[in-house]
Amino acid sequence: MHKSDLVRCFATCLIGKNASSDIKQTLQEIEPFAADRNFNVRECAWSIVRQKIIENLEESIVYECLCCYICPLFIPL
């Protein structure tokens, strides 16, 4: 991971806007950014994949790894 949070935020944009990636691949690639120590990077990760998650909701719910980082409602009890 790059030291600069700005560069890491830019990386989330590249991942999220990659039209050739399916939702599973996108979530796998964005996961480290969703768990980043910097709040802004985590927010960028969520914001950039939100539309793709909405468009592929069932597949996104099955792939729950990202959800535990970005949405406390999805944390398994």
Image: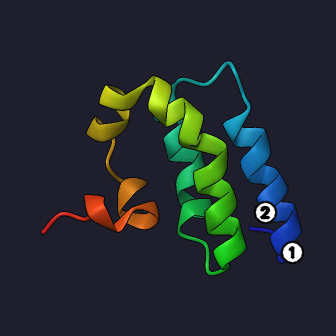
Q: How would you rate the neighbour count of disc 1 (Cα within 10 Å): few for under 14, some for 14-19, many for 20 or more?
A: few
Q: Could you tell me which secondary element the residue under label 1 belongs to?
A: loop
Say above or below: 10 vs 18: below
Tell me: 31 left or right of 60: right
Q: Position of residue 69 (x, y in %)?
A: 43, 65
For residue 48, what is the image quadrant?
top right
* Quadrant occupied by the C terminus: bottom left
| Residue 77, disc | none
Q: Position of residue 21 (x, y in %)?
A: 61, 25
For residue 43, what is the image quadrant?
bottom right
Say above or below: 40 vs 49: below
Q: Are marks 1 and 2 in contact (CB under 8 Å)?
A: yes
Kind of residue sitting beneath label 1:
Ser
Q: Give me the residue at 30% from left, 28% from top.
A: 58
Q: Give me the residue at 28% from left, 62% from top.
A: 73
Q: How would you rate the neighbour count of disc 2 (Cα within 10 Å): few for under 14, some for 14-19, many for 20 or more?
A: many
For residue 32, what is the image quadrant?
bottom right
Q: Residue farthest to the top? A: 20
| Residue 4, disc | 1
Of residues 63 and 44, the one nearer the viewer is 44
Q: Could you tell me which secondary element the residue under label 2 belongs to?
A: helix
Kind of residue sitting beneath label 2:
Arg
Say above or below: 71 vs 60: below
Q: Residue farthest to the left? A: 77
- Measure the alpha-carbon separation of dots 1 and 2: 6 Å
Q: Give me the residue at 48% from left, 24% from top.
A: 55
| Residue 8, disc | 2
